[in-house]
Structure formats: structure tokens, C-alpha cells
Amino acid sequence: MNSPGQGAVAASLQAIARTTKRGRYRREVWRFFRAKPLGAIGLFFIFLTLFVAAFGTFLQPYDPIQMRFTERLEAPSANHLLGTDPFGRDVLSNIIAGAKVSVYVGFVSVLLGAGLGGIWGVTSGYLGGRFDLISQRLVDIKQSIPTLALALAVVATFGNSLNIVVLAISLGALGGAVRVVRSQAITVRHMPYVEAALSIGASNRRIILRHVLPNCVPPWIIVASAGLGAAILAEASLSFLGVGVPPPHPSWGRMLSGLGRDYLTAAPWLSFAPGLAIMTVVLAFNLFGDALRDVLDPKLRGTSRRR
């Protein structure tokens, strides 16, 4: 049996190990911020968007859908920081409420599309043969259709509910994830440790889960992070065209389309505010995705350090 002294020593060693691990994580994060300041700025705005989406109900100065006709088309002021629309609704409150919709559509569609695409790509790249040939021809067919046209077709067929919009955008994220992850899976398939696992009789399922899939995570993360900005932009585009997220869900794209376009010269804040929100969020995800690519891609890691 272990003595109390041995137990105390073991607990101390575990505490030291945890402290060392936390310190290593802090150093890695700080190194990332110093090496990739634009990526750090993008990450800051991503966290800011997530915070606004999560706590927007408490941050909204007014009810975003409540109409106040006595305050219609007010310019930005102390009472309404971003002005009001022709129905007297506070623009800032609508921007905050729209962040929740954009974050939900962006993250769920990318998790669905890039997640299924990653599994498809790993399986296709590892198994190869006829399965890979047929699956890649299906991906070629899908990639030949513009993403926005495919989303419009899906929404026109099944309606423009929130979940249908998510499904339509996720189809656009599918093909890119399949291609990128498949190429990585093909590389990993020929590694010595995979051949060693095959030689001792390991099943394909075990090899995929234990060896191939973990090595395909870095490129998948890069694809997913870059796809988030594209998904948010796709949702705004569909809403701008009138087939996106339906009312009463606030949408940045719909704010740009209807009243923002009609009152472009008389009330420019109606289009400036949602346009700036879309541009900031999409740019933040793109900057962070580029920084992740430089950090996680072994081919670019040395180059990024030299720069």
C-alpha cells in the first residue's frame, strides 16, 4: 500500500505536470499571436461575434422587431447609435440579433457539410479503387454546379426555413472538404506505420480511426475555418436575394436587400451597418483561417517562421 507521503508526492507531481502543460499552452498561444498578428485580430473579432451571438438578448438596447413610428428614419444618435429604419426599429438591435442567426447558420452548416465531407474524403482516400473513382466523379458533378445556384435550387424546392438554408449552404461546403481531406488521406495511407498496421492484420476501420483520421484533422480544421466565412456570406447572399432565412429571424443580408437598398441615399446607415458587420465577420474568419493554414501546414510552417 502507498504511504500518505507517497500519495502527496504523486499529487504534487500531477499538479506540476498540469501547471507545465498550461504554461506550454500559454507559450504556444502567445507565439501564435506574435507570429500571426492578423490571425490574432481575426480571432478577437470571432470571439466578439460569438459573445454577441450568445448574449445578444442582454446587449440589445431595444426590441429588434418592435416598431416605433414616431422614431422612424432617425440618424445615428445617442439614443440610437446606428439609427432607425422606416418602421422605427433600432438598427443596432437588429445587427446584434442578426449575429445569432449568422453564427448558427455558419457553424451548423460547416459542421454538417465539412464534417460529412471529411468522413467521405478519409474513406475515399484510404479505400481507393472503384469506390474512390465513383465518389470523386460525384464530387466533380457537385463542384461543377455553382454553390449559390445549388443553394437557390435547394431553397426553391424545399422552402426557405432556417434549417433548409443550413442544409443548402452545407452542400456547398461538402465538395471542398472531400477534396482536401482525401488528398491527405492518400498521403497517410502510404506511410510506414499504416503499412505496419496492415501487416499485423489491423482492420480498415481501426486503421482509419487510429491512424488516418487523426492525421487528416489539421487540413480539415483549415477548410472548416475558411468555410465559416463563406457560409456566413452565403446566408447573407440568399437573404439579400429574398430566399434566405425567413422573418421574423433578423438577417444581415435582408437588412441590406429591402430597406437598405430602397433608402440607400436617404438613410445610408441602413445599408452601411449590416454591410460592415458582414465584411468584418467574413474577413475575421478568413484572416484566422490563413493563420491556421500557415501554422498547421508542415510545408508552410518553416516559411512562416522565416517571415
Image: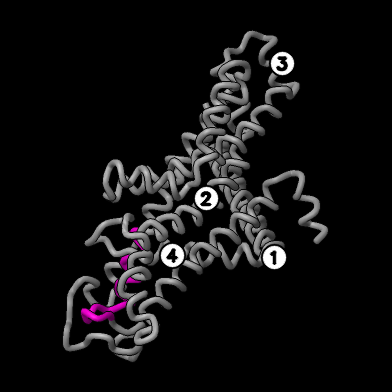
Q: Is residue 88 visible?
A: yes
Name the colouring of the figure.
one colour
Residue 49 is marked as 4
Question: What span is colored magenta in the figure?
Answer: 85-101
First along the sequence among labels 3 and 4: 4
SS for dot 3: helix
Q: Residue at x 61, y 49 (%)?
A: 21
Q: Nearer the viewer, mark 1 or mark 2?
A: 2
* Residue 227 image label: 2
Amino acid at dot 3: Ala
Marks 1 and 4: which is nearer the front? 4
Q: CA distance from mark 2 to mark 4?
A: 16 Å
Q: Secondary structure at mark 2?
A: helix
Looking at the picture, tell me which residue is in the foreground, 181 or 23: 181
Within 10 Å of the Cα at label 3, are there few (<14), some (14-19), or many (20+) other Cα atoms?
few
Indicate which disc, 1 or 3, sits on the residue closer to the N terminus.
Answer: 1
Q: Earlier in the sequence, mark 1 or mark 2?
A: 1
Mark 1–mark 3 CB contact (< 8 Å): no
Question: Which secondary structure lies at badge 4?
Answer: helix
